[in-house]
Image: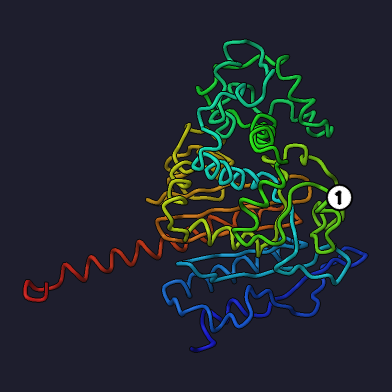
Amino acid sequence: MKKTGLVGFIGAVLLVFIVSGQHQIQPVNESSCVPYPHASEMIPELPEIEKIVSEYDSLISAEIKTNHTVGAAVAITYKNQVVLLKCFGVKKSGTNDSINENTVFRLASVSKPISGVLAGMLINENVIGLDDKVTDHIPGFQLNTKTYTDELTIRNLLSHTTGLAPYTYDDLVEQKIPLDQIMNKLNQVKSAVEPGRLYTYQNVMFSLFDTIVASRLGKNYADVLKEKLFVPFGMHDASTGFEPFKNNSNTALPHSGIQNIKMNDRYYNTAPAAGVNASISDMKNFLLTMLNDTSAFFSQVEETIFTPQVQTKLSRGYFAQWQKVDAKSYGIGWRLVDYKGRKVAYHGGYLKGYRAEIALCKDENAGIVYLSNSPNITAARSVPEFLNRLFDYKDQQKVANNSADNKKTPAEI
């Protein structure tokens, strides 16, 4: 098989940038980030994606350089293959310690889609039910009113329809108050509406899933996630919590702009919402599993998590880098959007020093994930720039094929 074209992009060398002591961006030795040994023998030629990947590769590489991104990694999968896996920059500015495919980043709120998949698996194993009452699993749990307490379900937690004001008690999360202590204060918060009526984004309420899983299975959340998802999906670098992240010698350290900032453990107390750590290799395998597991069990999981639960009214700025998004909703741990005639499952994540973006489209069997330890606008553009190119190409091909069919004579048809 030829070792040119698409394979060239996967195995291609790339520029890595570091920040000197004077914070000037300087090029260093070239390095590559290749997903597999002998990748050229494993990945078939996919000419329909080659030009798209080439254009996207050039754009994202230029954006990362222009916006002085300290470190990043991107992976694209298509038709059960990794068509781009590329790493950029360094783990810490001022060093030559390059990002590689096993470098671990914080996923921030991209933890929610992973938790959503775990929920879908446990639901389809009949371990829990979407409409289980929270009080069935957390005895003594209370909201401000008995009626709302009795109505609250797991579905409400994982679809942000608990009825509480957005970001309830995130201030306590920022102070690193343990989740069980925050939970005991929820009866002091007046609900805005009854559960199930409105979308109001949460970290604390979403993360009650941790307590439910531990109560139901008698294991801590990190162990369940590893057993049910990390190991089967081939996410060998992934972990949950601060200690595994801090103690890993191959972590991307946080930055504000190009300035190093102190590593911190904020939001690890809301593990399902924001406590997962993973490498680009992990997330590539996560995408491949999500897009290509055709088992009856996993089809049921997808039906559970990708069914819209509530319409979301997000600010215009949220999808500012996308073209027109026709509809927005939330499933179980995933944002669901109608985009250019396709269904796209998406989520973004941000916390100080990190940014993550993920999207997958079952209609086109394509997915993308972008991780960075230096948040800037490149992350916001990383997903739509790929989807725009892929979907526009597919639409053009459809028009061309229809035109060719219309020109055929009856005998040819």
In this rendering, would 328 be left or right of 376?
left
Mark 1 residue type? Met
In the rendered view, would you say 134 is above or below 341? above
Q: Residue at x 76, y 56 (%)?
A: 373
In this rendering, would 304 be left or right of 62?
left
Please state the horizontal and vertical placement of residue 177, each as a whole percent of the image.
83, 30
Furthest residue in direction right, as rendered:
21
Furthest residue in direction bottom, as rendered:
2
In this rendering, would 46 be left or right of 205?
left
Furthest residue in direction front, as rendered:
218
Query: Which quarter of the figure has residue 391?
Result: bottom left
Q: Along the line of sight, which residue is nearer the eye, 168 or 400?
A: 168
Element under label 1?
Answer: loop
Q: Residue at x 22, y 67 (%)?
A: 403
Q: Along the line of sight, which residue is nearer the eye, 330 or 26?
A: 330
Please state the horizontal and vertical placement of residue 35, each as a whole percent of the image.
63, 73
Q: Along the line of sight, which residue is nearer the eye, 166 or 69?
A: 166
Q: Quadrant of the C terminus?
A: bottom left
Query: Which quarter of the figure has residue 399?
Result: bottom left
Q: Residue at x 73, y 41 (%)?
A: 220
Please state the horizontal and vertical placement of residue 30, each as a whole percent of the image.
75, 79
Furthest residue in direction top, as rendered:
146
In this rendering, would 383 be left or right of 408?
right
Residue that label 1 marks:
263
